[in-house]
Image (cartoon, helix red, strand yellow):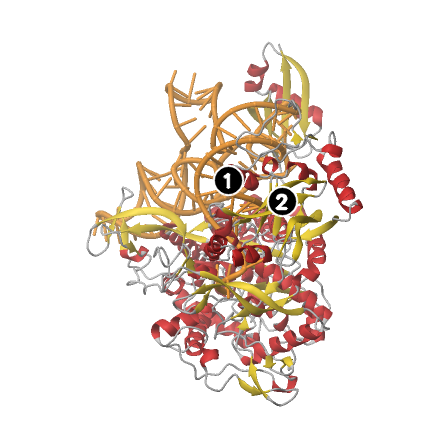
Amino acid sequence: MISEPAAPSLPVATAPSVAGAERPRYDFRAAEPRWQRAWDERGCFRVEDVPGGDKPKYYVLEMFPYPSGKIHMGHVRNYTLGDVVARYKRARGFSVLHPMGWDAFGLPAENAARERGVHPATWTWDNIANMRGELQRMGLSLDWRREFATCDPAYYGHQQKLFLDFLRAGLVERRESWVNWDPVDGTVLANEQVIDGRGWRSGALVEKRKLSQWFLKITDYAPELLAALDGLDRWPERVRVMQAKWIGRSEGARLRFELAAPEAGTDEVEVYTTRPDTLFGMSFLAVAPEHPLAAAAAARDPAAAAFVAECRRMGTSEAAIETAEKRGYDTGLRVRHPFDSGRTFPVWIANFVLMEYGTGAIFGCPAHDQRDFDFARKYGLAVVPVVLPPGEDAASYAIGDRAHDGPGRLINSGFLDGLEPDAAKSAAIAELARRGVGEGVVNWRLRDWGVSRQRYWGCPIPVIHCEACGVQPVPAEQLPVRLPEDVTFDRPGNPLDHHPTWKHVACPSCGAPARRETDTFDTFVDSSWYFARFCSPGAAMPVVREAADHWLPVDQYIGGIEHAILHLLYSRFFTRAMRATGHLAVEEPFAGLFTQGMVTHESYKGADGRWLYPDEIERLGDGSARHRETGEAVLVGRVEAMSKSKRNTVDPGAIIARLGADTARWFILSDNPPERDMEWTESAVMGAYRFTQRAFRLVEAFAGGVAWDTVPATFGVPARSLRRATHRTIAAVTEALEGFAFNVAVARLYEFASAILEAEKAEGAAGETAGLAWARLEALRTLALLMAPMMPHLAEEIFARLFPASGQLVAELPWPEADPALTAAESVTIAVQVMGKLRGTVEMPPDSAEADVLAAAEAEPNVVRALDGKHVVKRVYVANRIVNFVVAG
RNA sequence: GCCCGCCUGGCGGAACGGUAGACGCAGCGGACUUAAAAUCCGCAGCCUUGUAGGCGUGGGGGUUCGAGUCCCCCGGCGGGCACCA
């Protein structure tokens, strides 16, 4: 799920020593494994499938990783964010489900098999073992007992069961659709394997080919998936907008154009349009290259056939189709205008008409649609304006170089003249209906979900094809349908197809020899229900209702914005399908969603044009860079997403070994807001490392000698000041964590550490030791608790130093509460503006009377000068914040 | 091409419509040290000679007593586009 850069990264060079020659005071190398063991032994992060007790539940989930081999910084960011939430919620008294697993099917394993001869299963399980260790060294508060991998029959067998339930419920269909076909490799290509219209391996021109495939009927849920978006109030607005546009509800008309002469046994073409109001501006009709009419034209016209064949070499992705030059072929056929059968228009085959959308045919109105306009200009078709923009004159108005899709009034349109577009749409639809040639319809952009993949490393689709009985579901007692292990990748195509025996089975219905389905599921299917499986990962059925009913929906889901549409929409659909088949009660899988930004880094290029890893170069004082070993000058390139092809990656495993998990976590949280792209920089990481040492020194400098249970009766000025900082920090960090402003939480803790240091000095200088010492203990204890979600190991270490005999773990302690009596300010600074410009400030007691504040403001010397000779016409006063004098003259 | 975002000092960023630049990084000065590292203290948006003033949140316009924040237009950068995950 979490996407992968595309080539293996080099092992990191020698780890430079940290902190000079002196051994660091806080030894994370010893401390981190120690605390990880402590948490594990105490089972701090375990929860039951169906817990007892009265704690409220909280399910936090990060998108599970694809086991590519090593974790990357995107993982570190994702899982750190989730862990902060999990640990924070646990401290707030929730029973937290926080699981981890592996999105383990997919193309890279097959690529590794073909390129390096390693079996996909071996490759995948080895990667999982390695990455599990890396994640464990991050100190994540996961319930590892719940771990599973989607490539395990213990998981995908249940997925097959779900599919068969969906099939019975009528949520599955088999129909034909187009795929990218590599004619040289003889294999189906993923869109990413098509580069400039050619197969990535063979270089052959890709063709579209039609295959019989399985579809999940997500379109049945289109209205519900759209309407329910409104209820997802803890999702980012932009994700909801993107999904709404993707589902793409539109209102328009379906209408039938009569062919002037019948063709291939039909005498009409059906068209969907959202602009029936512009029918009088029509100048052509266009069908998709896959449209039956195009096929009919191709059958009798070699030139048409050549054009259609060329369109097939365009790839199936929408981006490829939309960015291609608009081209067409005039079939010579003509259609009659629905409102004026005397007028006829040419029928074109056009490469920008999508067979999947609407009816695969459009009518072209160049004046009011930009694509139609571009097409008309290219082929010399008429451009007749029928919507006159406001302020234009009907006699002189002409379309320039842009189509007009804005408001106006209808012209050149017979009975529609004078209407505005909305009214004209209704009138046109009514007229179409009256004539019996069309009707108003609601159309959806969303298409059914094709789940068949012609690949080995995926979940087998559990059906059997029988000559006599047709498609038969695999009987439940034969599940799981396991992938055969003895496969080879020495030739192109799907190894399941080539396997000598696997696909030959008896028909479950008649017993005759039959053929197993050799397609496997799209890996998006695997990730569309894993969140439900985590509630009862060992169950003998897909989900245990009691467990799922308890834990779902996921309270906080965290992952990359790149999944804003497909994965999230498929999961929303799956949840509904599982509800329809009795597996779940909830309607929505993810109550809260957070989308994180990418991790970026500078890129470096050597003199020979090769990309260099950050470890291979060193920066010089003047901002330039050179190669660590050869000394050659290195070009510092753009900061961009870490990718293996640009080699601008930093290996988290090496960072954690060198500086510790807490440093990595702290830095990744501190750099910037988590929804934005962050830049990984060596020096800023070192800043984070220094803070771990500084925080530890604060504790070392504390002499102790005060009892936590004995609160002093009185506090002197420095103690009160420190306690105010402590309780304000509690309030500020709590607010920041609640709002996912982790970088602000970090900043507040930096400030807090400075305040503690200041108090340390005050104690050295002044007396009143008892009160201040206790306030310092309170501050240090609070520091440990507040940092714990972000730097859990250091927090434990600090706490253990403060309370060596307590036997408590921070991981089990409640979150601190800010005492409002201690956070109140003793004075406020009020800004004084004259005409909106700052002219001074005044210090006032909080909530002073307005008259007092205005008097003080007007007395401020600089304000006096600014007001000199002016007449104050208005005094704006915002309590405790600002005064603004509006003046005249 | 279509859909959706983002843009604030040298850098990452902070800022209920109310003192723009908190905090961190890099930098500069100082203390400590034989020296360095580490640590601690201080300075720091830009311009003008300032404890005063002007300019300043990608560019242009607007709303408001007051705009980084709200609205419109433009520019740049990024994500998604259905078989990458």
Q: Which chain carries label 2?
A: A
The CA span between labels 2 and 1 is: 15 Å
The x, y position of residue A376, in whole percent, is 54, 39
Q: Mark 2 points at which residue?
A: A363
Q: Quadrant of the C terminus of chain A?
A: top right
Q: Which residue is drawn at 21% across and 57% down?
A: A629
Residue bearing the label numbered 1: A379
In the rendered image, residue A30, in percent from the top left (x then y), is placed at 41, 69
* Quarter occupied by residue A217: bottom right
Query: Which amino acid type is marked by label 2?
Result: Phe
> What chain does badge 1 belong to?
A
Q: Which of marks 2 and 1 is nearer the N terminus?
A: 2
In x, y percent, where is residue A495?
45, 78
Q: Is mark 2 on a helix, strand or loop?
A: strand
Residue A798 seen in the current view: no
Residue A241: mark in rendering:
none
